[in-house]
Amino acid sequence: MDDRRLAYLDAMGIQAWERKSPLIPLFQRGRVADVVHVTTDANPPLQNEIEVDVAGPNSLLLKRGREDLDALRSIVANCTACALHQGRTQTVFGVGDHNAQWMIIGEAPGVEEDRQGEPFVGRAGQLLNAMLLAMDLPREAVYIANVVKCRPPGNRDPAPEEAAACESYLKRQIALVKPKVILVVGRIAAHNLLKTDAPLSTLRGKRWSYADTGIPVIVTYHPAYLLRSPKEKRKAWEDLQFARKVFAAVPARPATCMDGGSFASLRSPHLGILPGALVSRESEARGSGCREQPPTALALPCAAETR
């Protein structure tokens, strides 16, 4: 390892490892991937490491751990793997609990996300927060990310090559967070995660698995679409109910930081502050448990919005 690379690792607070055996990288430029070690009995493999190439000649050897999300964020911030970097204000990496049991994945940053550097902070983000709170999930209790980390010009759909350039970043985020369930919002995100071009209507209401991880994936509408088509909120509510049932059926992780709760917990204090709550006020007033009634509308503007 040359002095320049060692200095870069030291500046990021990452310990460098010395190797006595060859290393065969399986990465593409600008993407993150696991590595294959060629070892002998006298030289056991270093466990849980990844090789990262940041669209340039230098690569970083990172140790797994909580700190990796922050290290990966720094790598993404300097990524030039596709043309989207040319028009961004900043990258939009992800936000939330690093050990969340729920992971929410959208398609791409919008105007506000590009300005603030955080996913789902515009009007669609307000609706997403309301949807999460209706499941008794504060925004801070989940981890939120996008398929691509830079805003496409004009809020257009990300191109396949742009999503491919960010794919391994998202894979690494999922591997580090280790969510119990992934909730995918929107057609573009669903197509990229599930490697399909099936219509959203076909993907909704089913339990899918992410790659070979076994992590359940549930698909629903993007909040921006729900703002444009408020009548579809009834179907989105059905998707959230289904996601909760899937969550309840998944065995608990060895270490958890959040109680998944149940449908009965939907009568939470959060609902009292939700504009046009997703659960009927009638059932709340009766105090007899939560009636799984879908909303007719949330008290949020329904004007057209892309993201």
Image (cartoon, rainbow, N blue to C red):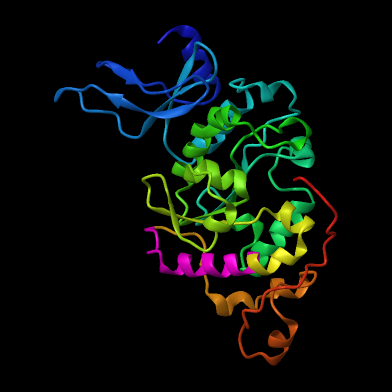
- Asked where in the image residue 240 lies, by quadrant, the reply is bottom right
Q: Residue at x 56, y 31 (%)?
A: 166
> Which quadrant is the C terminus positioned in?
top right
- The range drawn in magenta is 236-254
Closer to the camera in the image, 80 or 305: 305
Look at the picture and state if 112 lies above or below 91: below
- Asked where in the image residue 155 lies, by quadrant, the reply is top right
> Which quadrant is the N terminus positioned in?
top left
Look at the picture and state if 13 lies above or below 21: below
Q: Residue at x 45, y 60 (%)?
A: 207
Question: Is 138 inside the magenta-drawn segment?
Answer: no
For residue 142, say whether it is visible: no
| Total numbered labels | 0
For residue 143, say whether it is visible: yes
Assign the magenta stretch its main secondary structure.
helix
Look at the picture and state if 52 lies above or below 171: above
Q: Residue at x 47, y 37 (%)?
A: 172
On the image, the x and y values in percent for residue 192 come to 53, 41
Closer to the camera in the image, 196 or 240: 196
| Left or right relative to 195: residue 267 | right
Closer to the camera in the image, 21 or 84: 84
| Left or right relative to 95: residue 28 | left
On the image, the x and y values in percent for residue 202 come to 53, 57
Closer to the camera in the image, 300 or 142: 300
On the image, the x and y values in percent for residue 167 come to 52, 34
On the image, the x and y values in percent for residue 125 come to 73, 52
Q: Residue at x 74, y 83 (%)?
A: 281
Look at the picture and state if 60 lies above or below 294: above
Question: Is 239 inside the magenta-drawn segment?
Answer: yes
